[in-house]
Structures are given as C-alpha cells and as structure tokens.
Image (cartoon, helix red, strand yellow):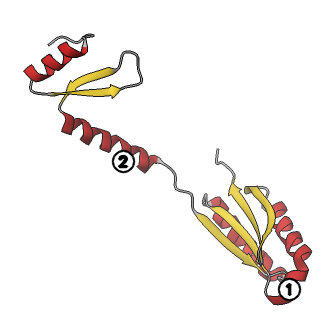
Amino acid sequence: MEVGVYPIERAKEIAQELELDLVEISPKASPPVCKIIEYKKFLYEQKKREKALKAKATKVVLKEIRFGPNTDDHDYEFKKKHAIKFLESGSKLKAYVFFKGRSIVFKDQGQILLLRLAQELEDYGTVEQMPKLEGKRMIMYIAPKKKK
C-alpha cells in the first residue's frame, strides 16, 4: 500500500482489502484527514496520550488560614509562618477573618489585618483577590510566586 492522497471511495476499498478501519483523524481539515489503522488500537493510543497529559497537569492546592478580627500579634506571626510555608510549597492561600456574633462591627480591623498579611507576604506570593466581605467572612486569596 502506498502513502498518499486518495478519494474517499478508494480509501474505503484499500481499508477493506487490508481488513483495517478508515479512521478520520482531523475532520475540520480541508480535505478531511483519514488513516487506515486498527480502530481499537487508535482508541487505546488516544486514551494513553490523554492520561499522560492529565498526569503532567499541575494540581492547584488551596490552603486556608483563619483569623479573628482581634487576632493577637503572636498568633498572627505564628499563622504568617504557616502561610509562608504554604506559599513556598506552591499552594494557593485563602486567608480569611471570621466574624462571630457582633464582632462584624470590626470589619475595618479585619481588612487591615488581611492587608498587613498581604504586604508581609509580598516576597512569597501575589494577591489574587483583595479582601472582600462574604457573609460573616472577609476573604483574600494569595497565589504563590513562580519559581525561577
């Protein structure tokens, strides 16, 4: 059998003679590209390629750190160290201030706390979303900086 461009009828005849399948590789091309191969083998190879691509894809891990609106300096530093560790390991960080009961009146303190954290973590990550109030939580996302 010779490799080349054949009309569809001739390609079907060749495939039947060889007892193989005529498989359309790229239907959007003009004219459509087809191959004469064993269809089951083609499907197997395709699944194998997709699995390899999926394995290479990076999985984003999201780590959370929770603060209160009146978090103490020592607790803040302790949680900041954890945040640094998370960002260095390549995980995204979700830092949030949880307001219990009437502590919602301290919204500005919560925002100041998150902005301070963002400023101190500038060397390790970039802010993806500035502090935003959602219900009883003020949430901020920080993505790790790309390693060189």
At 90% across and 80% down in the image, what residue appears? 106
Q: Look at the numbered disc 2 and give the secondary structure of its residue.
A: helix
- State the residue position of label 2: 51
To which quarter of the image does residue 13 belong?
top left
Residue 103 position within the rendered picture, expressed as x and y whole percent measured from the top left: 85, 85
Of the residues under marks 1 and 2, which one precedes in the sequence? 2
**Farthest bottom residue in view:** 101
Residue 14 is left or right of residue 136, and the answer is left
Nearer to me, 32 or 104: 32
Residue 131 position within the rendered picture, expressed as x and y whole percent measured from the top left: 81, 65
Q: Residues within 10 Å of mark 2 (few under 14, many from 20)?
A: few
Residue 82 is left or right of residue 7, and the answer is right
Q: Quadrant of the C terminus?
A: top right
Nearer to me, 127 or 134: 134
At 35% across and 40% down in the image, what residue appears? 49
Q: Callout 1, which amino acid?
A: Ser
Q: Residues within 10 Å of mark 1 (few under 14, many from 20)?
A: some
Q: Callout 2, which amino acid?
A: Lys
- State the residue position of label 1: 103
Compute the Cα span from label 1 to label 2.
49 Å
Residue 129 position within the rendered picture, expressed as x and y whole percent measured from the top left: 76, 58
Q: Quadrant of the N terminus?
A: top left
